[in-house]
Image: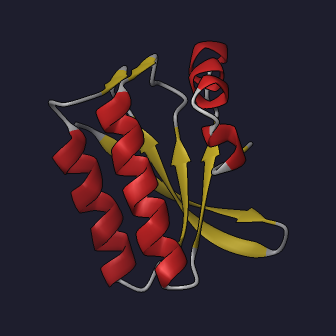
C-alpha cells in the first residue's frame, strides 16, 4: 500500500495526514495502514487525519482497523479525522453508524 504523509491545520491544531493511495482498503493492505498509524503514534503524533481521496472501496476489516486506531489514539488523548470520503464510503459510514464515531470532513 502506498501512502503520502503531510501536515494539515484544522481549528488551530496540527494533524498528521495520511493519504491512502490505493483504491481499496481491505484485507490485503490493512497491516500496512496499521503500521503507518502506529509509527506516527510512536513518534508522538496523536492527531491524525486519514485521507480517503483515492479509496473507492472499504470493507469491514478496513473499518475495524480505523476503529482500532481511533481507540488507541483516544487512549492517548489524541484525535482522528477522516477526510475526502466519496459518497459510497460516506454511505457505508452512515449505514454502520460510524458517522457518529468518526469525525468525517
| Residue 20 appears anywhere in the view | yes
**35 left or right, relative to 89:** left
| Label tally | 0
Q: Is residue 81 above or below residue 26?
A: below
Name the residue located 61 percent from the left edge and 67 percent from the top edge: 15
Name the residue located 22 percent from the left edge and 36 percent from the top edge: 1
Image position, residue 81 (x, y; %): 63, 54
Q: Is residue 39 above or below residue 6?
A: below
Q: Quadrant of the C terminus?
A: top right
The one of 82 and 62 positioned closer to us in this rendering: 62
Image position, residue 86 (x, y; %): 62, 20
Q: Is residue 38 above or below residue 68?
A: below
**89 left or right, relative to 65:** right
Image position, residue 46 (x, y; %): 51, 77
Picture quadrant where residue 94 is located:
top right
**87 left or right, relative to 16:** right
| Residue 46 appears anywhere in the view | no
Name the residue located 82 percent from the left edge and 74 percent from the top edge: 12
Picture quadrant where residue 68 is located:
bottom left
Q: Is residue 57 above or below residue 98?
A: above
Picture quadrant where residue 88 is located:
top right
Looking at the image, what colour scheme do you see? secondary structure
Name the residue located 61 percent from the left edge and 46 percent from the top edge: 82
Amino acid at each position: 500500500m502506498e501512502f503520502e504523509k503531510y501536515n494539515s491545520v484544522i481549528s488551530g491544531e496540527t494533524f498528521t495526514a495520511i493519504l491512502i493511495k490505493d483504491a481499496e482498503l481491505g484485507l490485503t493492505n490493512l497491516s500496512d495502514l496499521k503500521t503507518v498509524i502506529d509509527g506516527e503514534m510512536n513518534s508522538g503524533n496523536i492527531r491524525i487525519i486519514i485521507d480517503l481521496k483515492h479509496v473507492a472501496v472499504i470493507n469491514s476489516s478496513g473499518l475495524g482497523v480505523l476503529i482500532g486506531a481511533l481507540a488507541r489514539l483516544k487512549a492517548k488523548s489524541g484525535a482522528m479525522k477522516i477526510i475526502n470520503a466519496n459518497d459510497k464510503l460516506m454511505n457505508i459510514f452512515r449505514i454502520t453508524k460510524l458517522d457518529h464515531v468518526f469525525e468525517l470532513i
